[in-house]
């Protein structure tokens, strides 16, 4: 009987997961330092600066694509994995959408209670500057801070579970480790709001684990991510 050749280091989930976290952890401050060096003195890349210079809003968009999406996509292609492994499928789409909608409703209810009035995070972009380039930029922003970010988390959950051999467990080590680490990293930029982000991804991660469908969580997180809609409105005010 012919033996299968052992897979190389680049195929191992331990290496892939550690490389992805390392790339994200060290790449984020490196990009921040590079941006601070390139921008004019005493100018911070905040919302006011991006409104005044819409082209600058492409900096966080491209950074998100490179630091969050690049390695998971490359590893997926390198391993010749099918997209269905990470929940990109029609199977159980209905259940995924319904459960994700409940997460969105709970999130907006939390925001409304916190603000003392009915509120959401979605304000649609306008069309006063709807050139093909600006539409493309807005779509890239929505993709990067919505579906791509969820793919990053789902990819880490699945491959961390491969390490522990707990792919079938619902509240699995892959889910808990990934959400815990992701929430912790957000404390550096988001402070205590990182706990809200962790709660969002824990709920959406459970939807993915329960249904094996990530489409609902991707759409849900896009609706809940106010920063994605802010960037879209920068390009389409």
Image (tube, rainbow, N blue to C red):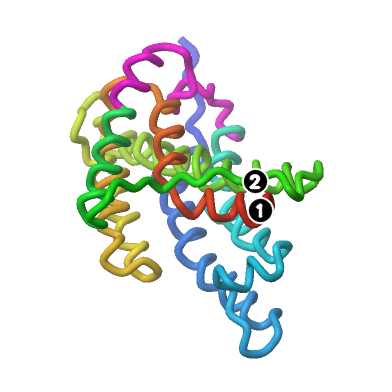
Q: Do the CB atoms of the residues marked 1 and 2 lie less than 8 Å apart?
A: yes
Q: Residues within 10 Å of mark 1 (few under 14, many from 20)?
A: some
Of labels 1 and 2, earlier in sequence is 2
Q: Which residue is mark 1?
A: 237
- Residue 12 visible? The answer is no
Q: Residue at 52% of width from left, 50% of height from top?
A: 228
**Residue 81 belongs to magenta span:** yes
Q: How many marks?
A: 2
Instruction: Name the spot of residue 113 as percent of width and height, x first.
Output: 20, 51
Element type at mark 2? loop
| Span colored in magenta | 78-99
Q: Which residue is mark 2?
A: 126
Residues under labels 1 and 2: Cα distance? 5 Å
Which residue occupies the foreground of this view, 60 or 113? 113
Q: Residue at 55% of width from left, 43% of height from top?
A: 124
Answer with left or right where residue 78 lies relative to residue 176: right
Instruction: Name the spot of residue 215 as percent of width and height, x first.
Output: 45, 26
């Amino acid at each position: 009987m012919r033996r299968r050749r052992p897979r190389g280091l680049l195929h191992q989930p331990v290496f892939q997961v550690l490389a992805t976290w390392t790339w994200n952890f060290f790449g984020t401050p490196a990009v921040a330092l590079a941006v601070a060096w390139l921008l004019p003195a005493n100018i911070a890349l905040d919302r006011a600066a991006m409104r005044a210079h819409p082209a600058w809003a492409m900096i966080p968009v491209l950074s998100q694509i490179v630091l969050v999406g690049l390695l998971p996509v490359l590893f997926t292609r390198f391993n010749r994995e099918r997209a269905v492994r990470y929940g990109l499928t029609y199977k159980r789409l209905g259940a995924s959408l319904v459960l994700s909608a409940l997460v969105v409703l709970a999130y907006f209810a939390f925001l409304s209670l916190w603000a003392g009035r009915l509120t959401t995070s979605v304000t649609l972009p306008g069309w006063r500057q709807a050139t093909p380039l600006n539409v493309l930029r807005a779509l890239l922003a929505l993709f990067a801070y919505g579906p791509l970010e969820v793919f990053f988390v789902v990819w880490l959950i699945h491959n961390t579970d491969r390490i522990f051999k707990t792919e079938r467990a619902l509240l699995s080590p892959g889910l808990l480790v990934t959400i815990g680490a992701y929430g912790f990293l957000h404390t550096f930029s988001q402070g205590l709001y990182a706990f809200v982000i962790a709660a969002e991804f824990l709920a959406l991660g459970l939807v993915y684990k329960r249904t094996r469908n990530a489409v609902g969580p991707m759409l849900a997180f896009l609706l809940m991510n106010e920063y994605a809609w802010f960037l879209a409105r920068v390009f389409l005010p």
